Structures are given as C-alpha cells and as structure tokens.
Amino acid sequence: MSGRSFKNVPVVPMLLITLLYLYGVSIFGTDNLSRANPNPADMSCREDINGDGNIGVADAIALLLLGRDDPGNSMADYNGDGKYSISDVIKLLLNIRDGNLTPVTDTTATDTTATDTTATDTTATDTTATDTTASNQTYTIQGKIYCALGLIGNIQILLAGDMQVTTFTGADGIYTFQVPNGRYTIIPVEIFGYGFNPISRNIRVSGSDIYNQDFFVFGWESLPGNN
C-alpha cells in the first residue's frame, strides 16, 4: 500500500456521511439502521428520500448528496425555509427519530379512472402506454469493490442524482443498479478504518449499460480479521 497516494482525495463529504452514519446508529441501533415505511401500500413518506421503502439514516445521506449535487431541487429543502443547508438533513434525522413522518398519497388511481371514460380516450391511452414502455426502459450500472487481498462483499453503495437508491455488494464484491437514462453519482459508504479511491463516480446513462465502475479500498487489510 506504500506506493499509493491519496493526498488529493477530498475528505469533507465522506466525513459528513460518516457522522450521519454514526448518528443513525445512535438513533436506531447497530442492528436496525432503518425502519419500514408504516404507511399503506398506496402511500409513501416524504422522508423516504432514496425511495427504497424504508426510513432511516440512508435517507439522510441521500438528502446530503442531493443537496450537494442539486441544491435547487425542492426535495433538498426539507425544512421548507427556501434553501438547502445541513439543517435540512438534521431536521430529517430528528423527524425520523421521533416518528414524525409525512405521508404522500399516490394519485395514479384517480388518473386511471379518468382515462377509461370514453372510447376516444382508450385509443389515446394505447399511445401513451407505448410511450411509457419506452420511458421505463432501464439500464445496468455495475462495478466491484476490491482491495489488495481481493474482492469485498457487504459494502453499502449509494446512488444519488436522478434516482436515489441503496444496495450492497454481493459475496463476489459486485454491486448492480437498474436505472433509467439520467445523471448519477455512485458513492460507497465509508466506515472508520478504511476508505475508497475514488470516493465517488459521476456517470451519465444514455441508452446503454455501464460497467467497470470499480472502487479500490485502502486500509481494509489492516483491520482486525482482514489480514
């Protein structure tokens, strides 16, 4: 490892993510870093920032990344003061801790009823369905997490940008996302004792799969039980 240099790797974003992770542990405990969305199936919570159906510290991290990449996004202004700041992330964490969740009702069913009114509307619906199929096309983002000892499993990976979601590497060290066209940032979650190079990757998905979005882990082999 002595031949590598990481002097130019910015550490402030990863320190913020690490602090949020540790604060989440203090709220939820090490065995329960998220809680299931308590709302019915046809409703979602405003606090579910990453859209994975669970409410927890991963949503606070997703809000932090959204505010960094797109501070003008209305979702980033969580506390409603007209601008994004770290206070939005803190407010989100406190609401999650206290169970103050804001339900958002899905109005899709109402729109579907209106579409079925006339035969003319049915024809229009067929055209729309064709367009929806094209817009719902998804593509693969894939990479691996590795160190000098080999591939590493069970590493949390965040995806921010036009879609927010969380996944983990498998036993083979590989992670995969299925996403529509858009701009994204891939960020592995850093825990004390080791870091990543690079700390994140910015990509654009435009009609094709993207592979080899790999991250090297430095300091992993020095952790107890890894050498």
Image (cartoon, rainbow, N blue to C red):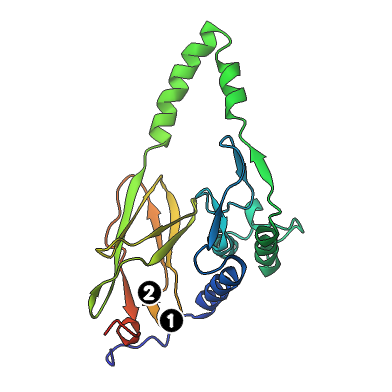
Apparent side of residue 51 relative to residue 74 in the rendered image (left or right):
left
The answer to whether residue 200 is above or below residue 178 is below
According to the picture, the residue beneath numbered tag 2 turns out to be 198
- Toward the right, the furthest residue is 81
Q: Secondary structure at mark 2?
A: loop
- Residue type pointed to by label 2: Pro
Q: Nearer the viewer, residue 93 or 66?
A: 93
Count of numbered labels shown in the rendering: 2
Q: Residue 195 at x, y = what percent?
A: 40, 79
At 30% from the left edge and 84% from the top edge, which residue is drawn?
A: 221
Quadrant for residue 189, please give it. Answer: bottom left
Whether pointer 1 and pointer 2 mark residues with C-beta atoms closer than 8 Å, the reply is: yes
Q: Position of residue 136 (x, y in %)?
A: 41, 36
Residue linked to disc 1: 9
Above or below: residue 125 compared with residue 2: above
Gap in Å between the C-alphas at discs 1 and 2?
Answer: 7 Å
Left or right: 176, with 25 as reference point: left
Q: Position of residue 226 (x, y in %)?
A: 29, 81
Query: The residue tagged with tag 1: helix, strand or loop?
Result: loop
30 above or below 218?
Answer: above
Q: Residues within 10 Å of mark 1 (few under 14, many from 20)?
A: few
| Image quarter hosting the N terminus | bottom left
Give the side of residue 180 with respect to residue 221, left or right: right
Residue visible at 37% across and 38% down in the picture: 137
Residue 148: x and y in percent read: 24, 80
